[in-house]
Image (spheres, rainbow, N blue to C red):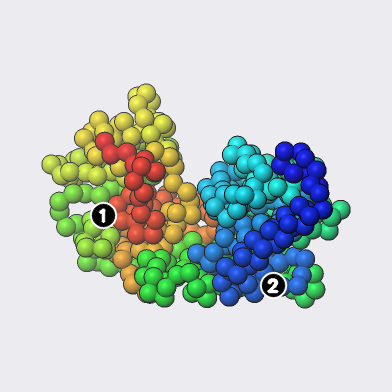
Amino acid sequence: MAGPAGSILNAPMARNLGTDLGHHADVIEQTFTTPQRQVYEADTRFRLLCCGRRFGKTYLSIGQLLIWAMRKPGGLFWYVTSTYKAAKRIAWKTLREMAPPHLVATVNHTELTVKLINGATISLMGADSPDSLRGSSLSGCVIDEAAYVNPRVWSEVVRPSLSDQQGPCWHITTPAGFNHFHALWEATMGDETWARFSFTTLQGGQVPAEEIEAAKRDMDARTFRQEYLASFESMAGRVYPDFNDENIDDRAEDTGGELLLGLDFNVGMMAGVMASLVGDTLCVWDEIALPNSNTGEVCQLVLHRFAGRRVLAYPDPTGAARKTSSAGMTDHGILRQHGFVVVSPSAPWSVKDKLQATNYLIRNAEGQIRLRVHPRCKHLIRGLRGVTFKLGTDEWLVDKSPGLEHWCDALGYLILSAANRVKPWQSGETGIALY
């Protein structure tokens, strides 16, 4: 057996090294929580763990990889998640902290690799390009956030790479609708080579009950069930499933003061919503629908109706570069030119964030309503009632063919910047631009 400097270890030294590695593997085992230990002790080659947020997935993943590596000299073990960047952010610090320094031979910070003195290697891998992962013989693997990892990575890369050594693999994740992970969950039912485990956040024991109740107040019901109860939630059907007559209220009127304006830029239809914040409730009291128009005409309309009012505009973030007029100025530039205060992030919003933030105001997991829409907002009401997900595609892909989504998008941009309780701004990270 070769040591870290390439020397040959004699038999007593090898035995001492094996004893030391075995001792540290035992120590890691003892740190697992009761539910983590249930997964760890399963007597199957393959395991599925579907769990709520903050279960301790990363700690369990890295702990298992280290135990495998300590007990298999010369082995190659992978931690795989959606991207290289995510692997570094989620697991690199944990791996370096959990690996006993005197048992580590080398650390490669670029390749996210730790090699132990017994020759075993643990590498953190991103699934950004599945084909680039081909060619290795794996001793074992953990796929973290498996519901968000390209399914090709398991079927075309990891599974074949484990074959010659007949290595184990764990798939660990919070669910993400009825996608490929759910299909694997269903397909492995009754298969003796697979063990399946499901735990809620509360069962994980890392988050107190009062914090989970607080999160429940800050999330829509469907997202709460998925993220905290580890429930497979369908993304089929209505995008805003809880919007109903309780959200439609003729008392949602202009309260004066600052005018909150959400805008979605389109060449065929300029869509917008006008709102006021009343405490923690967003009251949408009018809308804009200008076919074959442009940003300048929208500005003129608003200034004519609300002369002297301070307008806070929450537009589509892509308008910072896009032009819907022939004047050579961006949409955001036109808004600023007309005296509007433009509030927008430096990068486009994710569809998931926009939908979750809107659904939270419509009705959170505790049944509280914080979105009121006046009956005169007919386009917005039609959209909130009628926009659906596109069947047979990505879970967050909205069907735009009916053309109902423009006013919902305008509302979403406003909510994300002015009334977002689901995913608050993180200073210095999201780069909100206020002009």
Q: Is residue 254 visible?
A: yes
Q: So how many labels did they put on this image? A: 2
From the viewer's perspective, tell me whether residue 288 is left or right of residue 309.
Answer: right
SS assignment at label 2: loop
Question: Looking at the image, which residue is at 30% across and 31% down?
Answer: 334
Q: Which mark is residue 397?
A: none
Q: Amino acid at mark 1?
A: Ala
Question: Looking at the image, which residue is at 39% across and 70% down?
Answer: 211
Relative to 47, is 293 above or below? Answer: above
Question: Looking at the image, which residue is at 61% across and 65% down?
Answer: 27
Q: Quadrant of residue 71?
A: bottom right
Q: Which mark is residue 41?
A: 2
**Which mark is nearer the camera, 2 or 1?**
2
- Around disc 1, counting alpha carbons within 10 Å, would you say few (fewer than 14), some (14 to 19), or many (20 or more)? many
Q: Earlier in the sequence, mark 2 or mark 1?
A: 2
On the image, the x and y values in percent for residue 132 come to 72, 39
From the viewer's perspective, tell me whether residue 366 is left or right of residue 13.
Answer: left
Q: Amino acid at mark 2?
A: Glu
From the viewer's perspective, tell me whether residue 261 is left or right of residue 317.
Answer: left
- Around disc 2, counting alpha carbons within 10 Å, would you say few (fewer than 14), some (14 to 19), or many (20 or more)? few
On the image, the x and y values in percent for residue 259 come to 21, 49
Q: What residue does disc 1 label?
A: 275
Q: Quadrant of residue 316?
A: top left
On the image, the x and y values in percent for residue 181 come to 66, 62
